[in-house]
Image (cartoon, rainbow, N blue to C red):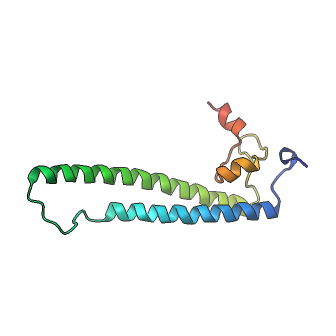
Amino acid sequence: MAEQEKKRYSDAELAEFKELINKKLESARNDYESLRATITHSGDNGTEDTSPTFKALEEGATSLSKEECERLASHQLKFIKNLEMALVRIENKTYGICKTTGKLIPKERLMRVPHATECIEAKEGRR
């Protein structure tokens, strides 16, 4: 039976996706924690800078770095939530079903983007 003719993925396939998602989730959580640690880490590295110009430049770079880290952390948190929702869909046995067309999302797409909720056709149709 072709994938597009199936109504849903088999329990064995869902288990395979679950393993993939759990690995990505662990990695994403570690990355998120690293970003959060960078954001909350105090800027004091134990050295006293006597040059006001250097200190102003350093503080500006630190501020930019923290803003970038906050943006990345926010993006990473969204990714984690999407992966967690994919695990819920696996438990409900609705994982891999396009929310727009009701068709099965190709396995190749789910292996690349395991939190996908739409097939490429539906996603491109919105543009």
Residue drawn at the location 49% of the way across and 66% of the way down: 30
Q: Is residue 59 left or right of residue 104?
A: left
Residue at 16% in and 50% down: 56
Q: Is residue 89 above or below residue 118?
A: below
Foreground pick, 97 / 18: 18
Q: In the image, is residue 101 above or below residue 115? A: above
Q: How many marks?
A: 0
Residue reaching furthest bottom?
46
Between 106 and 118, the residue placed more toward the observer is: 106
Q: Position of residue 105 (x, y in %)?
A: 75, 46
Kindly identify the residue that appears in the image at 72 percent across and 64 percent down.
Answer: 91
Residue beneath the point at 69% across and 53% down: 111
Tell me where residue 80 appears, x and y as whole percent.
Answer: 55, 58
- x and y, in percent, of residue 119 in the image: 71, 42
Quarter of the rendering containing residue 70: bottom left
Q: Is residue 34 left or right of residue 125?
A: left
Horizontal and vertical percent position of residue 71: 40, 50
**Residue most toward the right?**
1
- Position of the C terminus, as image quadrant, is top right
Please state if 59 lies on the left or on the right of 37 as rendered. Answer: left
